[in-house]
Amino acid sequence: MAWKIQINPISCLFKDKTGNNSRKSKPKESIEVETIFILSAGRTGTRFFQDFFNTCFSQVYAVHEPQPDFFDMGMQKIRTDLIFDVSCQNICEFRKPLLKQVLSTPETTYIESNPHAAYLIPELMATFSSIKFLYVVRNPIDSVRSFYAKSPKDSGGEMLFYGENDHRKRICPKDFPGDGWEKEWPDFNRVHKIAWYWNKVNSIIQESLQNSENSLQIKYEDFFSKNQSIREKTILQVIEFLKLTEKRDADWNKINHIMNQKSNATKVEYLPPFEQWPIREKEMFKELTKEMRIKLNYK
């Protein structure tokens, strides 16, 4: 039975020339689509999840960072006084075509794998009357090494994540009053910045999903584990939580085939293993990631 995903009667608020809030009401509209967002700080197989769900579950329409990908809206929320209802209305307008597209197909479930949605969790909850979140966490060392090796848009390394030529103005300590790292930020190297980013984004997700009954947190290492028992247990946990099919009906031939493809993916490494880092770099990394390493049970 599909959840009633109602695009709520959001009031489109904006500030007029006097600085007062003006209001233009939008009509109520309901779309019967099960909606799921996959959240993470990134480098957690976000693109793979699109292929995984589309391949293994016939009722699913899964996408990876559809445009607009919410990055700009998230930055607006953090850096300006963008009104909550305006964000909700924008989400409604941006995703309504995709939800309607699902209605025109045999699929009944919309899954969006998008780390940029991490900044907009309260708005997503308010926009969709019923929604589920799959939150994927990953070891900070592996995450940082993966981020370090990849460009933001897979552009062949031309634009490096938090590099000088990164065209996106990503979050930094000055965006969060009281963060504590603002003075040190100008002297941070890319590893420091990415480590800080991993900690901050996971803390944002954790805070937004606090006490949520519609979210499931899993570890990347468990979902992609080479230990078949751990991997299958985690996959079944996801299937059961998202109610994609009965556990006994899961197509393990399809699941194992696509999981093996992921396991065999070529890995390019630009940072040495953590054990080979200078002592000072190790200590700095541990300090930058301390809060969420403890909460997420990573040593």
Image: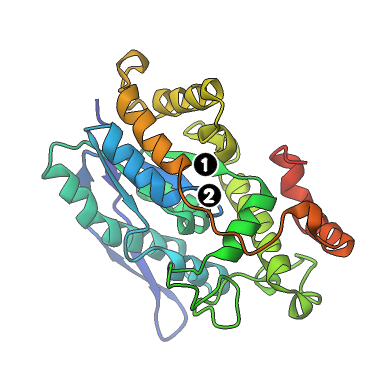
Q: Farthest left residue?
A: 104
Q: To which residue does mark 2 refer? A: 40
- Sequence-wise first label, 2 or 1: 2
Question: At 75% from the left edge and 80% from the top edge, which residue is drawn?
Answer: 186
Q: Is residue 75 visible?
A: yes
Q: Farthest bottom residue?
A: 17
Label 2 Cα crowd, 10 Å radius (few <14 / some 14-19 / many 20+): many
Q: Is residue 185 above or below residue 233?
A: below
Label 1 Cα crowd, 10 Å radius (few <14 / some 14-19 / many 20+): many
Q: Quadrant of residue 298?
A: top right
Are circles 2 and 1 on residues that touch, CB within 8 Å? yes
Q: Position of residue 248 (x, y in %)?
A: 34, 13
Q: Is residue 200 above or below residue 2?
A: below
Amino acid at pointer 1: Tyr
In the image: residue 236, left or right of residue 185: left
CA distance separating discs 2 and 1: 6 Å
Q: Nearer the viewer, residue 35 or 12?
A: 35
Q: Position of residue 237 (x, y in %)?
A: 47, 24
Q: Position of residue 228 (x, y in %)?
A: 51, 23
Q: Nearer the viewer, residue 130 or 171?
A: 171
Question: At 59% from the left edge and 37% from the top edge, which residue is drawn?
Answer: 221
Question: At 23% from the left edge and 53% from the top edge, which residue is drawn?
Answer: 98
Q: Position of residue 97 (x, y in %)?
A: 20, 56
Residue 263: mark: none
Q: Is residue 80 above or below residue 49?
A: below
Secondary structure at badge 2 equals loop
Q: To which residue does mark 1 refer? A: 135
Quarter holding the N terminus is: top left
Secondary structure at badge 1 equals strand
Amino acid at pointer 2: Ser
Q: Quadrant of residue 4?
A: top left
Colour scheme of the rendered structure: rainbow
